[in-house]
Amino acid sequence: MSFDFRGAERRPGSSVTGVSLLFSAGKRPSVEDIERLLGGGDGSAPAARITHKPPREQGWLELLSSGLTFDLSGLAPANPASGAEIRHAYGFDAVPEMGALEAVEIVPGGHIAGGSTMLPVVRTLAGLAADLALQLPVSAVAWHSAGTVMAPGYYARMVMNWLGGGAFPVLGLTALVPAEDGSIASQGLAAFSGQEFQLEAAEGERRADTVKLAIRVVDHIVRHGPLTTPGPIDGAPGLFAEPSQVGKVVWIWRQN
């Protein structure tokens, strides 16, 4: 499904590697709100600092976080940022009406756009968005490359746990899509590894158990890098990976 958020306008340079913070109408922060938030006036260390501030009417700021720059756009008084294609929702008791929300977008800055899928860039982007989601009246968080939308608390917990050394947020920064034959395909994993995979289901296996295996595969690939040669998958007994010679798909079979 595709949502065009209220007042959305496509901004030149918008990136697939990005995240949108979604707000109820009239609740988007202004340029001045972000300045106050990142001022560190409460004694806490800010998640980022402002390194470029165009005229406020343009509604965007350049932020520096962990030595990397990101563009934050869609701030009031400008129009909201562009809509995003959303296909999967996670962490909500009830999914909000997306068509009524307004987006503020965070994407890698122009000078690092070529490396926007490098893991340090993605980790910093995810952490910056999580920090802002906890401090602003965010209704939902959309992760562009996976086509996912998440409850802000769910997103922040998953990301902070990952950045602290925990498991990768599979159901959020990627998505797992079931097929009619019981197999599971990843979606959005290519943003981290350059690959997607399709996991064969075992006869009689519960869908939940197939999904658990798929989660382990995603976590393994993000931690160790793409699967480039045929062979078993460490940490996932009974699974055999076969990278396609055409395209960027890995087929994962069950070993007898």
Image (cartoon, rainbow, N blue to C red):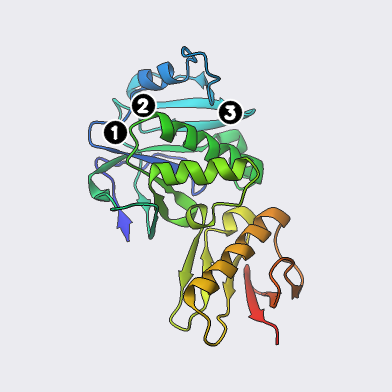
Q: What quarter of the picture does the N terminus occupy?
A: bottom left
Could you tell whether 97 is left or right of 247 in the image?
Answer: left
Circles 1 and 2: CB atoms closer than 8 Å:
yes
Where does the image place residue 5, in percent across and percent down from the top left?
28, 45
Local packing at callout 2 (Cα closer than 10 Å; few below 14, some 14-19, many 20+) is many
The residue at 34%/52% (across/down) is: 92
Q: In this view, does 5 lie above or below 28?
A: below
Query: Residue at image x 45%, y 25%?
Result: 61
Which residue does the numbered mark 1 point to in the structure image? Answer: 79
Nearer the N terminus, badge 1 or badge 3?
3
Quick one: SS at disc 2?
A: loop
Residue 24 in view of the camera: yes
* Residue pictured at 63% horizontal, 67% vertical: 248
Res 65 label: 3
Left or right of 70? Residue 229 is: right
- Indicate which disc residue 59 carries: 2
- Quadrant hosting residue 241: bottom right
> Which element carries disc 1, helix, strand or loop?
loop
- Tell me which numbered mark, 1 or 2, is placed earlier along the sequence: 2
Q: What amino acid type should be assigned to the residue bearing mark 1?
A: Asn
Gap in angstroms between the C-alphas marked 2 and 3: 19 Å
Place of residue 208 in the rendered image (x, y in percent of width and height, measured from the top left) = 49, 71
Disc on the earlier residue, 2 or 3: 2
**Residue 157 vertical position relative to residue 48 in the rendered view, above or below:** below
Three-letter amino acid code at the position of disc 3: Ser
